[in-house]
Amino acid sequence: MDELTKALDIAITGTLKQHALEALTRQLKEWQITLPPTEPLVLDFGLGDFYKVGLIEYWAANEVEAGYCGKFLFVFDGQACPMHHHQTKHETFYILKGQVQMTFDSRTFQLNPGDILPVPQTKPHSFCGLNGPALLLEISKPCLIDDNYFADTRIPIGKGYKTK
């Protein structure tokens, strides 16, 4: 099973997904941004509180054999991608729109459009929309679902959080 299929298996469906995607579409239109024509992942990380803990991902590429991944990550105001790290994946985040409160390696700070943050393997990180929605570009090593180590062990994907 490929990684996108694994992720789609735990994505939100139904009315909540529809409403989230409608709100995202309105925001993208306001920003005058078009995202790739791929199936978006509307994720609540299995916690059932999408607008508090969740995000919408558009995978532009996840080329496991070639060694790279590119995703657009959208969070609503105050919505957080939960604290996690990866054992093998190195990520670089580029803020396209909005502001993000980033927690990285035990520090919390604000990132603005144009800011770049490389996140090496094993470094815990999370982010949330600040003062409105935000759109990030993630450029990284390939996304492997089992390489996600979430601090909240209730999250049913990846592996339980492990400290280095």
Image (cartoon, rainbow, N blue to C red):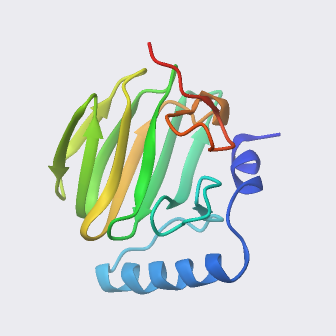
Please name whichever residue, 94 or 9, is drawn nearer the observer in this view of the structure.
9
Please name whichever residue, 4 or 33, is drawn nearer the observer in this view of the structure.
4
Outermost residue toward the top? 164
Q: How many marks?
A: 0
Please name whichever residue, 105 or 140, is drawn nearer the observer in this view of the structure.
105
Q: Is residue 32 left or right of residue 57?
A: left
Please name whichever residue, 89 or 123, is drawn nearer the observer in this view of the structure.
123
Residue drawn 37% across the image and 52% down it: 137
Q: Is residue 146 left or right of residue 112?
A: right
Find residue 3 and report its image quarter. Answer: top right
Residue drawn 36% across the image and 25% down it: 123
111 in relation to 74, above or below: above
Residue drawn 32% across the image and 44% down it: 93
Find residue 2 and report its image quarter. Answer: top right
x then y, percent, for residue 91? 40, 34
Residue drawn 28% across the image and 35% down it: 104
